[in-house]
Image (cartoon, grey):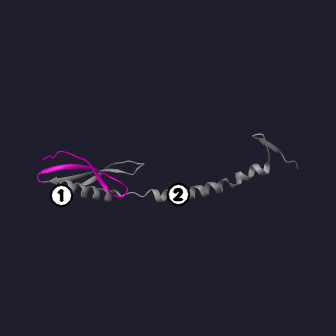
């Protein structure tokens, strides 16, 4: 039996050296995917929606003493950073306010703005 020689990049290879890396490719891909899944599971921790609404309501009640008259809403989620924009609805005295906050992955709220009070 005659071995066929291949020339790749001006180097001489036999069939056995060319087919060897192809045999190991599925194993390399499986190990790489497994390692990337392990790394990604540690990074993807985020604040749940109900916890972010609760944190936003607490921060809004520090600004405006009163009570929550509607459940809050998660309006937006910034995908790279995981920051959520949450609306809280507060009744203070006779006025109704909407307070907007950013909530990060650790459930720490930062107030952005509030609306003028409405009757």
How packed mark 2 is, by other alpha carbons closer than 10 Å (few <14, some 14-19, many 20 or more), is few
Between residues 68 and 1, which one lies in front from this camera angle? 68
The spot of residue 54 in percent (x, y) is 28, 59
The spot of residue 78 in percent (x, y) is 38, 47
Residue 108 within the segment the image draws in magenta: yes
Residue drawn 61% across and 57% down?
A: 30
Circle 1 sits in a helix, a strand or a loop, which is it?
Answer: strand
Q: Is residue 51 left or right of residue 19?
A: left
Task: Tell me the residue that label 2 is attached to.
Answer: 37
Circle 2 sits in a helix, a strand or a loop, which is it?
Answer: helix
Q: Given the current orientation, which residue lies at the most extreme top position?
A: 10
Between residues 27 and 58, which one lies in front from this camera angle? 58
Which numbered tag is attached to residue 104?
Answer: none
Task: Tell me the residue that label 1 is attached to.
Answer: 67
Q: Is residue 66 left or right of residue 76?
A: left
The spot of residue 24 in percent (x, y) is 69, 55
Quadrant housing residue 60: bottom left
How packed mark 1 is, by other alpha carbons closer than 10 Å (few <14, some 14-19, many 20 or more), is some
Residue 55 within the segment the image draws in magenta: no
Residue drawn 75% across and 48% down?
A: 18
Between residues 88 and 65, which one lies in front from this camera angle? 65
Q: Given the current orientation, which residue lies at the most extreme left position?
A: 94
Among the two numbered marks 1 and 2 on one chain, the one whose residue lies closer to the N terminus: 2
The spot of residue 33 in percent (x, y) is 57, 55
Q: Is residue 61 left or right of residue 18?
A: left
**Label tally:** 2
- The boundaries of the magenta stretch are 93-119
Residue drawn 35% across and 54% down?
A: 104
- Give me the C-alpha separation between circle 1 and circle 2: 43 Å
């Amino acid at each position: 039996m005659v071995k066929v020689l291949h020339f790749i990049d001006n180097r001489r290879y036999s069939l056995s050296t060319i087919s060897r890396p192809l045999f190991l490719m599925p194993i390399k891909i499986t190990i790489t995917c497994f390692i990337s899944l392990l790394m990604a599971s540690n990074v993807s921790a985020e604040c749940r929606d109900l916890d972010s609404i609760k944190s936003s309501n607490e921060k809004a009640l520090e600004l405006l003493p009163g009570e929550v008259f509607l459940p809050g809403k998660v309006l937006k989620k910034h995908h790279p950073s995981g920051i959520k924009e949450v609306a809280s609805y507060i009744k203070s005295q006779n006025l109704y306010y909407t307070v907007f906050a950013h909530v990060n992955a650790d459930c720490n709220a930062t107030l952005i703005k509030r609306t003028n009070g409405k009757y």
